Structures are given as structure tokens and as C-alpha cells.
Image: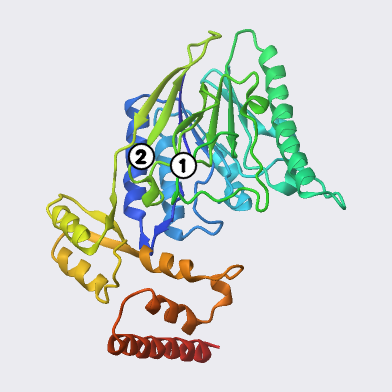
Amino acid sequence: MKFLHTSDWHLGRSLYGHKRYREFALFLDWLAETIMEREVDTLLVAGDIFDTSTPSNRAQELYYAFLCRVAGSCCHHIVIIGGNHDSPSFLDAPKELLRALDVHVVGAKTALPEEEVIALRDGTGQVEALVCAVPYLRDRDVRTLVLGESCADKQLRLIAGIEEHYQQVVAIALEKQRQEERYIPIIGMGHLFTIGGKTVDGDGVRDLYVGTLASVEAAAISCHLDYLALGHLHVPQRVAGSEVIRYSGSPLPMGFGEASQQKIVVEAEFLPGVEAPPRLELVAVPCFQQLATVSGSLEEILIRLAEYRQAEGSLWLQVEYTGELPVADLRQQIESALEGSQVTVLRIKNLNIREQILCQLEDEESLDDLGLEEVFDRCLSAYDLDEGTRAELAASYGEIVRDLLEKDENRE
């Protein structure tokens, strides 16, 4: 029996204002074709199907079209759990209808733990596997309010509640396993942050529990599981050195920080009736949109841009200017260097200016303590400018600020 583990699709996500529906459609087409080519029996989607709790019509269309296509293929079952980005009620609303297609959805913690244990049956009605489909557990799902408790106590009780819930669900699965005449595997699913999990800057991973550092010990939730399919972290990785506790990671790079990652889905194959670890294979996901970052002085940036002009296919670029002197027409020079190419600049970061301003802050002073004019004045002071240039820049800045303030007043 073959399982394919994926997670963190984030359908509907944009990157600096640029829609990514073409990428999502290409990924889902590839995933459906991969399922059929590899004769996958069950697809596991470990949360964050959508990027927001109110997905767009286009994102919903991609989701339902994919489910219908795969449900009519060799794939006998699809198991989906909710993530922290998903709306539990939105995912759960069509669950009874989707069950007719052998699509099992657990958007939120259920009223009874046994409802999160899904028995996957073959054409004769025999149980082939048991899936502990535990969705993202919200604070209110696992912890009751205790007056006067400290932040540390709150965190400990939250982690204990998560672990206890997993243990209850796994215990029910073990009892069902004992009732079978032959060995059947138990697969766990979860959407959470485990201790030691790796993230990267710019990957878009949100803190699960605001104000805490709640991370769960993998061993506390993985006992007796033959495989644990996790979601939430976008970097594909093993957990606690175990081959059978894994994050599949996001199939698309969610930000420029993920641009160099090889994205994957995980195939786990179990032999019928054999109590043995699954055979695992990491299946590489193609890159559907190239992302790259260029950093350096203006001269270094322009040299790199000249190289990228020759690249084939669409390329989305992030430019980080680190030069010592201000460049008034930085964006214009970058756009001019790329004119007529397939390169699109999504973001330009002037790292030097912010560092210069921060260096001027007095002790116990922050940017919030400075007015708009004072921040710009300190920015000008960071550079060796003649009085004429400084006066011209200050006048232009003042005009821009006044224009923005007037627009805000008219909007109100």
C-alpha cells in the first residue's frame, strides 16, 4: 500500500502582490499525474491547504477540481487535516459530501477522539490501514483557562494538552489494530511545530501559538505509529533523526528564503500484513517559477542583472542594495537593465539606509520614538551630501508626506 505525504499548499498565496495561481495549477496537475504514475493508494495532506481562512473562488476551484480528478483515479483515499492557516468550518462544511468520494476531511478537533481515527478499507471492506488524522490543535481545544497562571505554566499545559490528545487518538487506533486478524499499519498526521524543527528566513511560517514557544517533543506523539506525516514547517526534514517522522515541506517556495530548496513529497510504501518500517522515497517536485535574490552594490547588482537577462523562462527577483551611497533612481536603473527580458523584480530592499538610521539611535531610543521628518533627516545625515542636494531631497520628501497625509484624510 502506497501513501503520498504532502502539506502546506497555501492555495491562493501571493508573493509581494503577484498572484501564483498558475504555479498552484501546475503543481496540482503534476501531483495528480504523479499519483497515477506511481499508483499511489492514499494521499495525505497535512494541513494549510489554503493560505487564508477565506480562500478566493479561484483557490477553491483548484482544490475541488483536484479532489474530483484524484478521487476518480487509482488513489482510493484522500485524508486531509486542517492547518493553522485554514478555516476549520470551511474545510469541514463539505466533509459528508466528500466522504462519498473517499475523501476524509478533519478540519478541527472533533467532539470524540475516535472520530479522528480513520479506517481505510479496500474494495472488499477489509481494513488496509488506520490513520490518526489530528488537525491543528488550537489553544482552546486542549487547554482550559486557569486564573493567575504564568506564561510558563500556560505553555506547559498547552504542550501537555497536545500530547495527551495525540495519545488518546493513538490508543484508540491501537485497540482497532488489535481487533484485526492481520497486522495493519497506523499512520499519524499532525500540523504543529516539533522540537528541533528547522525554518528559514522568509518562509512565511507563522507562529502557531502567539506569545509562547510551544514546541512538542516528537517522541511524545509518535509512539506506536508506523509513520508520522507532519505539516506546518516548509523545509522538508526528518524529525529527531527518525526516518518515519517527517515534514514534507511546502511544494512551492513560499518566499525568497526558500528559493534554493528542493521541494518534495514523500512516498511511504507498506507491505500487506508485514510489521516492518515502510519503504520511503523522496519524490522531487519540479520548480514551476524561478525565484532568486541579488545583493550588493549598484555595480554588482547590474552585473548580475545582465547575466539574468540571458536566462530562459520566467524569473522573479528580489534585489537587496547594500551600497554605501544613496541611489535616487535605483528602481529605474534596475528596471532599465531588465527591459525586454523575462525577469520581473518583485521587491527592492535598501538595506543600507535602515542600518545607517539604526546606528544613530540613542540609548533606549527606537524608531517608534522618531517622527517622519526626523527619520528622514537622520537618513540624510548618514551620507556625505552637499547642502543643495540635501535641501532638494528634503523638499521632495516633505511633498510626498503631505500628499500621503491628504489622501488619508480624504479616505476618512
Q: Amino acid at mark 2?
A: Gln
Q: Examine the rendered structure and indicate whether residue 328 appears above or below residue 120.
A: below
Say which of 25 and 139 sits in front.
139
Query: Could you tell whether 54 is left or right of 254 in the image?
Result: right
Q: Residues within 10 Å of mark 2 (few under 14, many from 20)?
A: some
Where in the figure is residue 24, as x and y percent of width and height?
37, 49
Query: Could you tell whether 211 is left or right of 302 in the image?
Result: right
Which quarter of the figure has residue 354?
Answer: bottom left
Query: Could you tell whether 99 is left or right of 145 in the image?
Result: left
Is residue 179 among what the camera can see?
A: no
Q: Secondary structure at mark 2?
A: loop
Say which of 2 and 250 sits in front.
250
Where in the figure is residue 218, as x and y percent of width and height?
62, 28
Q: Are marks 2 and 1 in contact (CB under 8 Å)?
A: yes
Which quarter of the figure has residue 329?
Answer: bottom left
Mark 2–mark 1 distance (CA, rounded to whole Å): 10 Å
Q: Amino acid at mark 1?
A: His
The residue most toward the right is 147
Say which of 125 and 161 sits in front.
161
Q: For the point 22% across and 73% down, which residue is it?
A: 332
Q: Which residue is mark 2?
A: 261
Q: Secondary structure at mark 1?
A: loop
Q: Which residue is mark 1?
A: 234
Say whether disc 2 or disc 1 marks the residue closer to the N-terminus: 1
Where in the figure is residue 122, as x and y percent of width and height?
52, 20
